[in-house]
Structure formats: C-alpha cells, structure tokens
Amino acid sequence: MKHDFAAIEKKWQDKWEEAGIFHASGDHTKKKFYGLVEFPYPSGAGMHVGHIKAYSGLEVVSRKRRMQGYNVLFPIGFDAYGLPTENYAIKTNTHPRIVTDRNIAKFTQQLKRVGFSFDWTRTVDTTEEGYYKWTQWIFRKMFDAGLVFRATTLVNYCPSCKVVLSNEDSQGGKCDICHSDIVQKSKDVWYLRITEYADKLLFGLDEVDYLPNVKLQQENWIGRSEGAFVNFPIADTDDSLRIYTTRCDTMFGVTFMVIAPEHPIIEKYADRITNMEALDAYKAECAKKTEFERTQLVKDKTGVKIEGLCAVNPANGKEIPIFISDYVMMGYGTGAIMAVPAHDERDYDFAKKFGIDIIEVIKGGDVSREAYTGDGEMVNSDFLDGIATKKEAIAKMLEFLTGKGIGEKGVQYKMKDWAFNRQRYWGEPIPIIHCPTCGMVGVPYEELPLRLPDMEQFEPGEGGESPLAKVESFVNCTCPKCGGKAKRETDTMPQWAGSSWYFLRYCDPHNDEVFASKEALNYWMPVDWYNGGMEHVTRHMIYSRFWHRFLYDIGEVPCDEPYAKRTAQGLILGPDGEKMSKSKGNVVDPNDVVDEYGADVLRVYTLFMGEYGSAAPWSESSVRGCKRFLDRVAALTDMVNGEGVTPKLETAFHKTVKKVSCDIEDMKFNTAIAAMMSLINDIYEVGSLTKDELGIFVRILCPFAPHLCEELWAWLGGEGFASLAEWPTWDEAKTVDATVTYAVQVCGKLRATIDLPKDIDKDSAIAAAKEEAKVKQFTEGKTVVKEIFVPGKIINIVVK
RNA sequence: GCGGGUAUGGCGGAAUUGGUAGACGCGCUAGAUUCAGGUUCUAGUGAGGAUUCCUUCAUGAAGGUUCAAGUCCUUUUACCCGCACCA
C-alpha cells in the first residue's frame, strides 16, 4: 500500500467524528482515565508546532488507555480572555468577540487536521456566558468566605498595558505581556487571599506525583520560612518596632535596625524625627526606581539614618540606630529588620558603608574581612555563649524571647496575595456592587452571569480606569441589600481566572444548574495526568490548585488536589537552535508540515525529536526520516504472507510490544518509536510477515500515527476502528532470545563475543569462554585470579 | 548570590541504572533500481594506526573506587533554566 496521507487522513478524521469514538462515555462503572493538556490561548498567529508536541504526549497515552478499555476523558478548550486579543482588537478596530471566535475557529481547524482524539463535544470557551457565569460564581463564593479583599498598596503596574499585574505576572520586573518595565504604583486593587492557602498548597505537594522540579519551583515560590517575630522597643516611648528574623540566635550581634522607606513608623513619629527632609528625599528617590533598578544595586547599599529615633536591642538593652533603606521591602515580613552585620552579607555591606559596629557572635569566619554566614560556636552572646549549633541557639533564644514576652515563633512566605483585577475590557466582570450605605455587596447568585456589556470603544482610560466605567447602564444599579442607588465594580478579572477551574467544567460542560454535577466530579476527578509547560508551574498551577482547594473546603469538589500527576514537555527550538519567534523568522507552522508530509508524520516527529521533557531543535531532514518510516510501514502490505507467527520475528515482536507499552508510560516516546523503527528494519531483513503480526504492529503504532494505522487495519479486515482495538500484550518469556550474545572480557577488556544458550550456568559459560581463541591468547601462561559471570550479559576472566 | 539541570560521533539523541558506548533517525560514502530524482533498495560510516583474521584511544577536564565507570566518589570548566537585597 502506498502511504497516501492526503487521501486517508481527512477520511478517517471524518469517520471518527461521525462515529463519535472519542467521546467520553457516561458509563461511570468503567475504569476511567482523565488526561488533561493545557488548553490554548487562541492567538491570531494560529497554532505553533510547540502546541502539537504539548498535546501529542497525552494524546498517545489517552489513545493507549482507550485501547486498554478505559473510559477516557481527553478534552480541549480555549482560554480566550486576555490582553493579546484585546490589544489586537483595538489595533484593528474589531470587537474582541469577533477576533476570539475567528481565532478559536482557526485553532479548531488546525487541531482537527492533526487528528487529536479530543472529545469535541466537551470543549469550553472561557469567554462564553455559560462558562464565565461559574467563574463569577466561584469568585462570589470566595468573597463570601472572606478570601477577597480590597486594599490600597504599592502594586506592579505596566504603563504600556495600563494594568495592574500580580507578582507572578511581573517576574524580573518586566510585564509578562509586553515586556515593558514595571513601575510601582499606589493603587486600590482587589486581592485574593491566596496566602491563607500557603501551607495547604505547600503540604499538598506531598500527596501528588509531579515532576521533582515542578514541585521544587512551587516550594520555592511559596517560600515558607520559619523564624521569629521580635519587638524592639523604641527608646523613650511605649512603642516598639516589630521585626521578623530567621536568625534570632544572632541577636547579640545586632548593631542597628533598618526599615523600609514606606514604613509607617516614620509618619507616626514625624514630630520627633529631626531629619524628615532627608528621609523624604530618599523616599522620593526610591519611588523613581523601577523594580529592575532596585534589584540591580545589590552591592552598593544606600540609606539614611533616622535622627531623633532610637531602638533598643531587647537581648542586651543596648541602644541602636534605625536606618531607612530600600534593601528592606515593605512587602515581606514586617518591613523592618534587625541588622547583624557580622553574619549577614547585606547588613555587612551596609555597616561598612555607614561605619557601624560589627560584632562577631558566631566563631568560624573573619568578620573583619567579610560576613560569616556559616555555623559555629556562639560568642559575645551572654547566655548563648558556647552553644555549638544554630538549631540549639535558636531554640534557646526563642525560649528567652517567649519567656520575656518580647517575641514569638513565626512563619513567613515569599508568596504574596494575588492581585486580582485588570482595568481592561476583555475579561470577566467582577460581580461586586459598591453601595454607599452597605459597602461592598456581592451580585446575587441568581443574577449571574453578570454580563460583559457590548461596547464599541473598549480602550482603557488614560487614568488607568476600566473601559466599563464609561457604560452607565452597567455601572448604575441598585444595591441588592438595601435597594438604594449603587455602582458596580468596573474592573475585570485577570486572564488566569478562567483557567483556574476549567478541568472541572470538562467533567460536565453543558450543565447550567451547577458548574459540574457531583456525580460527574466524583467519577472523573482528580485529573489522572496533566501535561503542560514549565512556564505555568508558578502561576496557573498554583492558582488553580488554590481555587480547587477552596472548592474542596466548601464541599464542592470531592478531592483536595486537582492533579494527581504533572509532567512537562520541552520546547521545540527553531532549526537554528534558537527559541522560535516571529522576529527571528524561525517559526515552523504545523499546517505546512501537514500539507507536505501529513499529520501522522508531524505527530511522530514531534515525539521522536528527543527526550519529551527537553528542548530540541526542529530539523526538516529528520521530519523526512519519519516520513520514510511511515512509508515503509505502509509498504508492509506487500510483504504479508499467511497467518500466525514468523519464527524469525517472534522475539522481536514480543520485545517491541513490551518496549512500546512501557515507554509510553514513562513518556519515552522517542525510544518507543525507535523500537518500532528497529522492528521494521528486522521485518525488511526477513522479507515477510504474517497478517497477525501486521495487526499487532498496527495497534502499537496507532496512538502515534492513527490515520495510517486505521487504513492498514481496514486493509487487514480488522473489526471496527484500530483506535478502539485491543492493545496487544506480550509474553515475557518470549522477549528473550534462545541464545544470548555474551561479551567476554579478560581483565575488564573486551576480547570476544560468544553466543550461548539463554539459561546457561556459570561454569559452562566460563568454560565455553575459555575455549575462545582470542581469550586463550590473553590468558595463556597466566593464573586465573577471578571469574565473573553476569547472566545474560558478560563473562570476565581476571588473570595475573 | 541562592536553587535546579545539562555536557556522549558531523547533527538530534540511545545505553536494561555498574556489565559489548554510540540503539534509532539525520547527514555522508559506495553500489543497484529508475527516463529522471529531494525516489526506493543494499552495504558502509566515532577517531587514529595496520587493512585478511587486527589493535590503540575515546562519553566537557583532572584524579579516585572497582574485575568492570557515560553511569559511583572528589576536584574543576562551560552552558541552560528558575528565584533574586525574602531578613
């Protein structure tokens, strides 16, 4: 048979669709498999080969599960709210609804061309009313639970996109959307209290099967640290300055304190401070710096001493000065630190610059040259002197602090609350009403969805206000509580809202009574296997785990963690080895590959490129190699000869079925394909195979190249679809050849190879090895010191 | 700075976890088929030396453990990714 991909691919896609063979079944008595891939953002550029690789992995697993008799849920949808669409809409003066629909249509067409076995009856679109109604519903539940709050704080603001960004969206001081520099701006924003879930998100990692580096990144992002809060009295007042430290053992080494420039204590004691002008000048200077600049000046510390205010070290009663400096952040801990220059590099740099005392309290370094951060014996520390370990010293100091009532154990997290609003049009309206008498009131559940009003002009306001503020019919409303005149919140939710629970909607996507029925959730959840990009592990993954754990706490979902297993695919680089980007002109369009080589080749190639989790450059000639492989598979029909087993191929078939079956589970798709290529080479060498053998081959290749396999299955007269045929099994005993090639070494050097029966015993094997001419040549006249026999592998004779 | 990772032919990458390094694919060489080939088939292909049956050296670098090391240990170099003044 010729591999006429252009003719067969569309044909089988239509047949699959007509028969609905990839629809998840409503039969909840069968064993289930829920495979999830990150739904795409439908951008105008269309799909990227990276999408294909990202979906192909679980595509193969899902197809294998179906053939193994599982009821499989393998859904797809579109995460369609967000700035790129809106920016494009503004630029081209087209409504984002139209842009979104057009992009979704394009993605759908492209995905279908590749023949993915998605259940197309369960697609979700986060911008549809029937979907965002439930996004708003969950938000309202969080509002009721006290997890939503509004605060005026310094926020990350992108002057180009004119939006407030979360910490997760402004990593490295750059806007995640347009890569402009982020500035710090004081703004009234909505927050989700994700920090309340910090411990749950951290400890929940113990019960899931994520890639180790995915877990680690989440752990680091949450950044739990254990330490102590300590109150340092402010001299001549009843007040104190509260600090957080992980090193309370070094308290006798404290020689000054530093507070963030924005710390409220400055305003509080403005009348006592004698150098307010200098402090204000410094504050103004800091505000001008971008986040990036603030992190650049790591070595050169700046700051100003507060004159007229003095603190007392509660450990030894000594008076110490207080400084303001931007190396202390208001957003972490209490915005104030105790400085121990002898044992902290930053404090050391600062003390050197300002000529402050440096007192060694831990032996082991040379504090006249640099800060010593290692462990050692305590000195100059009163009751801690002589203690040799950090752990012990901390415990003793904590006891002292607690006993005196001046401090206590405490925990801090790097993770901050989630800034949850955007002053933009293309997002879910936040269902809150501002009433002058009742304050913030949630939009009643029965009024959801709170529809996004249709607008002609949806550009953001210059002052950073949402475009929705211009729609009077939207803004003006009555308070659901008191019936008085009130105004609606006009901000929308960030792009990450819709994707925080989409995996739940897939379980029951058409339900308009609840976001998903209990029955469907009980059966399908948790997601058995979730695959996606590494770039989402500290945002989407954390956010969605947070939402899901919240829903679990209020009894809406049956399990605490949403994803049982998480893996990640590696990037596909351009042919030049660089990251694919439009500006570099090295982007490969999957449509072109399908046109020229077919969908099966595209699928096989993206999985054959290299290790699934690693980045690998695109190579057109390697694509041709995969084409050649499938052409050779198609041509097997000319070699079919009879039924049953070809003796020369029997072991090779059992081996390959085993290898492919196991490799799919480990996502080692490249070696699975290599094994099938090897088998093809063996078959070509033998020159013939049976119908039964072709049937086995077709079924193990089917998850990778389903169109060709369906065609071959039909040629064989197979029943139904290859895609639903039973996954082949192997006989372990038949995966080993009757004779094994042993490597024979003399003193660890390879001298010969001999074929021996597979269950030969040690003595006969060694005797046989010694008979080899090559072996004799190296052993003659010498005494044998040691004989090593590894069954099935190697014989090593050590001589002297 | 902290944390994690990677390093194997001309290229992408294998190696059953300590047991014949280079599977599979690309590329290249030769031969055959074809009117032609960006076709197909067959053979060869880590490097150096002898070319008939050989032999030495090779997994970023340098040591070590072992009968045996790409794999384990120590030191070191380069690159990649994540976080970044986190107190």
Image (spheres, rainbow, N blue to C red):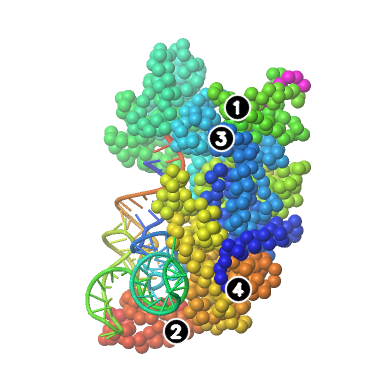
Q: Are marks 4 and 2 on the same chain?
A: yes
Q: Is residue A329 above or below residue A580?
A: above
Q: Residues within 10 Å of mark 3 (few under 14, many from 20)?
A: few
Q: Is residue A486 magenta?
A: yes
Q: Is residue A278 above or below residue A6?
A: above
Q: Is residue A736 above or below residue A515?
A: below
Residue marked by disc 2: A756
Three-letter code, disc 1: Ser
Visible residue check, residue A200? no
Q: Nearer the viewer, residue A714 or B77?
A: A714
Are the residues flagged by discs 1 and 4 in contact, CB closer than 8 Å? no
Three-letter code, disc 2: Leu
Q: Is residue B9 left or right of residue A93?
A: left
Q: Is residue A273 above or below residue A743?
A: above
Three-letter code, disc 3: Thr
Residue A589 in the image: state x and y as whole percent.
Answer: 51, 52
Residue A356 in the image: state x and y as whole percent.
Answer: 33, 25
Are the residues flagged by discs 4 and 3 in contact, CB closer than 8 Å? no
For residue A92, the mark is 3
Q: Earlier in the sequence, mark 1 or mark 4?
A: 1
Helix, strand or loop status at disc 1: loop
Q: Are marks 1 and 3 on the same chain?
A: yes
Could you tell me how far apart the alpha carbons at marks 1 and 3 are, in whole angstroms?
20 Å
Q: Earlier in the sequence, mark 2 or mark 1?
A: 1
Nearer the observer: mark 3 or 2; the answer is: 3
Q: Residues within 10 Å of mark 2 (few under 14, many from 20)?
A: some
Q: Earlier in the sequence, mark 1 or mark 3?
A: 3
Q: Is residue A383 left or right of residue A364?
A: right
Three-letter code, disc 4: Ile
Nearer the observer: mark 4 or 2; the answer is: 4
